Amino acid sequence: MFIYITIDETIASNATLGGSGMGSIIGYASSAGLVLTNSSYNSTLQISPEQNSWVSSVSNLGAVIGCPLTGFSLNYFGRKKTIIMASVAPTIGWILIISAQNFEMLLAGRIISGMYCGMISIAANTYVGEIASPHIRGTLGTAFQLMNVIGILFGYSMGAAFDDFRWMAGLCAIPPILCSILMFFNKETPLYLLSQGKEKEAEKSLRHFRGENYDGIDNEMYKLKIYLEESQKNKARIRDLKKSYNLKPFSMSMGLFFFQQFVGIGAVLFNMTLIFQENFSVQKLKIFA
């Protein structure tokens, strides 16, 4: 089966490049951890293994902070601006790490850069989901996770190429900044523009993503209007979770997310190099990891 994807939809999907920025934050912890804790690298900053555990994992705390901020920003500023503004967090975070003189600066940098993980994972998927045609929404929806894995690999590869955690941090700062720069050339999603009462701009945006020769603009605009009307009439409330038809799928989803994280995958990703250290020499383990 042939799946047709317009050029503009492909370009707009560069929002998923933020996934590589998120992945580089995860992968960096593993590569930098070895340099920061091993005296043989003559790093300008040394920390203990216990401190490194905090530096590696504390980005999750930043993600917890970033998630609720994104929910507000998506509705107030829009999808496009939220993705652009999200790059502020990793930029500040990476600068702190690059200039770090002590453990506390590393910790602060990881927390702030970790906010990006919580923000971009929501904002990018929302953006792509709203600009993609229904027949390719699932295909483009997987792009974020693909870019996330590529970003993790990129972070790991920094350990094989450099012995300086500051150089690693500088290169890992590139993906989120590049994502935001490219987003300046994208348009806002039709659904958000329509929710703000900007019908003409919404139609123009939809035509941009679908192409000038697309003859289904009126039909899609009609469906978007119906969707918004139903959403406003049936706003979700906390007590709605008590209803069985909501509680069951909600519980299943939360259970899936819970076990997905609590199997310990985070600990493995953050400490991949240190795990390999138990079995390989210092000279080889970064490449294997």
Image (cartoon, rainbow, N blue to C red):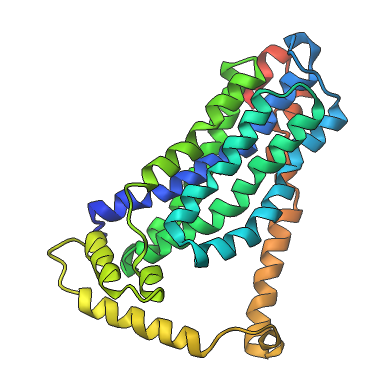
* 116 or 76: nearer the viewer: 76
The image quadrant of residue 97 is top right
In the picture, which quadrant includes the C terminus? top right
Query: Which residue is pictured at 43% across the width and 37% down the height?
Result: 178
The image quadrant of residue 187 is bottom left
Q: Residue furthest left?
A: 213
Left or right side of 69 for 129:
left
**Residue 99 point in image, percent of width and height:** 67, 23
**Residue 91 point in image, percent of width and height:** 57, 36
The image quadrant of residue 142 is bottom left
Query: Which residue is pictured at 35% across the width and 78% down the height?
Result: 224
Query: Which residue is pictured at 67% across the width and 42% down the height?
Result: 112
* Residue 241 visible from this viewpoint: yes
Image position of 240 with respect to 213: above or below: below
* 184 or 40: nearer the viewer: 184
**Residue 131 point in image, percent of width and height:** 35, 63
**Residue 170 point in image, percent of width and height:** 56, 25
In the picture, which quadrant includes the N terminus? bottom left
